């Protein structure tokens, strides 16, 4: 798996979704989605993009650590932002416990990814 290309492509998807939400808010004059918009762009676009650049520039050897970092980052970014959407927008009549756990678990997975990135960044890279 090419970590850089995967992260870059997913960051592009987040960028498009975040920009669309921002455009919608500006056009409608409603700012109900501002928290979701900010997190999609910061976590989904900016963070995944920064990690894509890191993997392209430093090209660390594939390992359990790097694989774990990339996949927890991807799962966490989607989990946090989808969980946030479910929590704040409430588009479906889902149980509160499910929505809260989805949001919290997604955020926790993303947090783990950030800690794994610290380990990857401080590990000897080629």
Image (cartoon, rainbow, N blue to C red):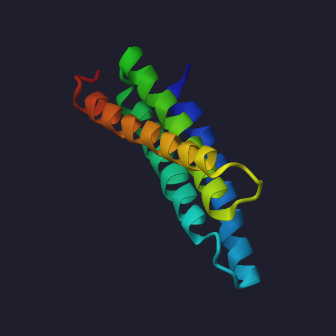
Relative height, residue 35 to residue 13 (above, below) = below
Given residues 33 and 124, the one toward you in this image is 33
Q: Quadrant of the C terminus?
A: top left
Give percent across and percent down for residue 94.
72, 49
The image position of residue 12, as x and y in percent, is 63, 48
Residue 125 visible from this viewpoint: yes
The residue at 59%/47% (across/down) is: 97
Residues 119 and 60: in front is 119
**In the rendered image, which quarter contains the N terminus?**
top right
Q: Residue furthest bottom?
A: 29
Question: Does residue 94 lie above or below 23 as drawn?
Answer: above
- On the rendered structure, is 112 left or right of 84? left
Pick whichever, 102 or 95, lies toward us. 95
Residue 63 left/right relative to 1: left
Position of residue 42 measured from the top left corner of the image (x, y, whole percent)? 49, 57
| Quarter-of-image position of residue 2 | top right
Q: Position of residue 3 (x, y in %)?
A: 51, 27
Tell me which residue sits at (76%, 81%) in the image.
28
Q: Judge whether residue 11 can be spotted in this image.
A: no
Residue 70 higher or lower than 1, as above or below? below
> Which residue sits at x=76%, y=58%?
91
Total number of numbered labels? 0
The residue under the point 75% across, 81% down is 27
């Amino acid at each position: 798996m090419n970590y850089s290309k995967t992260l870059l492509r997913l960051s592009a998807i987040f960028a498009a979704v975040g920009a669309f939400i921002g455009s919608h808010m500006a056009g409608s004059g409603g700012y109900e989605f501002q928290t979701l918009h900010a997190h999609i762009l910061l976590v989904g676009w900016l963070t995944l993009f920064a990690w894509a650049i890191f993997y392209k520039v430093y090209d660390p050897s594939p390992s359990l650590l790097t694989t774990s970092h990339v996949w927890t980052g991807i799962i966490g970014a989607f989990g946090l932002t989808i969980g946030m959407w479910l929590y704040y927008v409430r588009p479906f009549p889902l149980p509160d416990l499910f929505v809260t756990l989805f949001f919290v678990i997604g955020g926790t997975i993303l947090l783990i990814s950030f800690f794994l990135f610290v380990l990857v960044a401080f590990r000897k890279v080629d």
